[in-house]
Structure formats: C-alpha cells, structure tokens
Image (tube, helix red, strand yellow):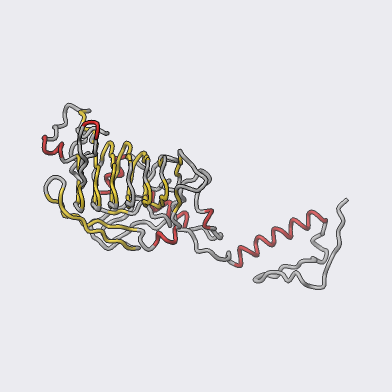
Amino acid sequence: PLPTSATHTSAMSPSPSAEELASFSFGGVRARPRKRIEGTVVSGQTYLKPPGSLGSRWPGLGISVNVECCEDCEIYILDRTEQVQIADCKNCRVVIGPCVGSVFLLDCSGCTLSVAAKQLRLRDVSNSELRVYAPTKECVVVESSSSLTFRAWDVAYPTLDSLFAAAGWDASVNRWSSVYDFSPSEHPNFGLMPQSEQAAGRWSELLLAPEGLSGGSVEERVGSRPITPGCECPCAAADGAAYRAGWYEPSPAVVRETAEEQKGTERVDEDCRFNSDGSQKIGQFPELGSAPATSSLSKLSQCIDGLRCLFGWAESERDPFPITEGKAADLSGSHSQTCAVQ
C-alpha cells in the first residue's frame, strides 16, 4: 500500500497537522486473516478533497492519497497529488484530478472513474468505465482486468486549468485511446467508446459543497455543453469540442489544435480518428459524407492528366474523357480508345 503521509521535499513548506494527514486516507479496512484483522467496508458516503486541499496547499510536499474498501461511495480527489491508490471498491463514482505521478486501481468492479494522471495502472479491475486524460502514449496500463470501457476525460470544475498547468501537461494532447494490455486474451479485455456515444455527455461539471477536511457533497451536471459558471476544463472532448463558456476560455493551444482540425473537409472514417501512434486527434472532425463537388472534380482531373501522360494524348487531340467545369464527366459516352501496353 502507498504511504498516507506527506514527504518533505522543501524545508520551507509547513507540515500538515495530524488531522490533515488522516484526511489523506478514506474507506474501510482490508481483511488480513493472518493478523486476525476483520475487513470492514464503508458504504454510501462521499469523500471530497477539493482544490486547494492537497498539493496546491503544500506545494513542497509529495502527497499520496489512499482509498480502499468502499461500496456505493462517491470519491472526489480534486487537487494535485503525487500518487493515488484506489483498492477494493465496488459500484463507486471516482474522480481523480491531476496526479503528477501514478494512479493505481486495484481489485475494483462496477465503478465509473475519471482519472487525469501521468500514469494509470489497473490490476484486477472489471466491469468499469474509465474516462481518462493521458499525457503520453501508453501511460494507461491494464493487467489481469476485463470488461473495461475507455473514453476521454469529461470532468470540469473550478481551478482545473491551473492544476493542469502546474502539472506541466499539454492540454491539447490526450492519448486516452492508447492503452497497453499486459495480459491480452483471446477476447479483448477493454474497448473504446465511440465518439458519437461520448458527445451527449461530453462534460460532467462538478458543483462542490465541501465540509470539513474531506466531507461535503458534489452535484454532477452531465451534458453536451457548459452550464455551470466557474467550471473549467483545459482539454478538448473526444470529438474535438473545446470547453468554452462566457466565464472560461480554453488555453490558446487547445483552441489552435481544434481550429486546425475544423479546416479539414475530407471524409473521416470512425477508424481513422487517431494518429498512427494511437493518440487522439484533438479537433472537430467533419461529419461523414461525400467531399465537396469541387474536391471530387479536382481529383478526377488529376487522374485524367495522368492518363494523358501514360498513353500520349496530346492537348490538341480530342479528349476521350472531357471534363466540364461544374460537373463530373459522363464516362458512358460514345467515345472510346483501346490502348495496348507493350
């Protein structure tokens, strides 16, 4: 298990109190028969560490958070952390804000998790949905897990933009679809949610009401567009839509990447929405359909020019395949020419 205390990295930083250190852990107790320890489970509770309660408050400390043995709980770790471990949790909603180290998910089932981390490792996780921000290729690692669904990061809440910046991440790049499976099987252990299914609930905005060191309540508002003032999200959704609202504009890098993708007019197939290295193409993809007539005409003209060069048709000769501006050629006309290649 990960340490639940903070380790000094700067003599200038004040230390958390004993009560604050205790708030870095949540949940029940794992059963340890050899030590005659009976397991206990925490059920139906909310664990909330809001922005400013962890790494932002103690920037000189490496803070780890440990959550285990929870059922039907809501777990929100919304400040910057060094490491996070979630273990033995069932049917929980989990949100983990920027973690500059590793997030470990162990022995969990039936959970919905939104995770932004330098590295995300899963072991013995099943029947769960992962909504991921991944800054590098294959930083999401799956082992001995099954029935997993991955999609892009979806959460927006106050100060998230500055937390991403403090982590040093390029918000215009999200490699959520680049997943490495350590234990592949005959049947895939995970799948990627189609972008069309993500669009309706691309944003999950958090309305926070913290109480004490780790309590309170959270209201999640899920929709296709921002509606909650104060919320922020610096990275684009899976379909390239940027989180834009009257109270917030995404970073110039995200806007630039989105605008560049919106210039494309070629047909984009669902299987071609990722780069060759498996990373997500950030930006608005055009709807599936035919390219504009002018584009089709240009390509057809290039083909005809190639045929002229291959078979030696002179510009002065009657063109067997005339192209009329504004419409494609009728290739079923009476003109024909037989060519033999020696």
Picture layout, residue 187 above or below residue 167: below
Quarter of the picture containing the N terminus is: top left
| Residue 101: image location, x then y, percent | 32, 36
Along the line of sight, the residue nearer the viewer: 137 or 283 = 137
Q: Determine the image quadrant of residue 321.
A: bottom right
Q: Position of residue 19 (x, y in %)?
A: 11, 38
Q: Residue furthest top?
A: 11
Query: Viewer-proximal residue, 112 or 177?
Result: 112
Horizontal relation, residue 257 to residue 230: left or right = right
**Relative side of 292 to 138, left or right:** right
User: Is residue 101 toward the left or the right of residue 340 in the image?
Assistant: left
Q: Quadrant of residue 80?
A: top left
Q: Position of residue 202 (x, y in %)?
A: 36, 59
Most foreground residue, 25 or 210: 25
Question: Residue visible at 77% across and 57% down?
Answer: 307
Is residue 329 positioned above or below 104 on the image?
below
Q: What residue lies at 87% left-to-right and 56% top-to-bottom? A: 340
Looking at the picture, how far across and down is residue 201, in whole percent?
35, 61
Q: Report how many numbered discs are placed on residues in the image.
A: 0
- Nearest the viewer among 259 and 64 is 64
Q: Quadrant of residue 334?
A: bottom right
Q: Residue at x 45, y 51 (%)?
A: 191
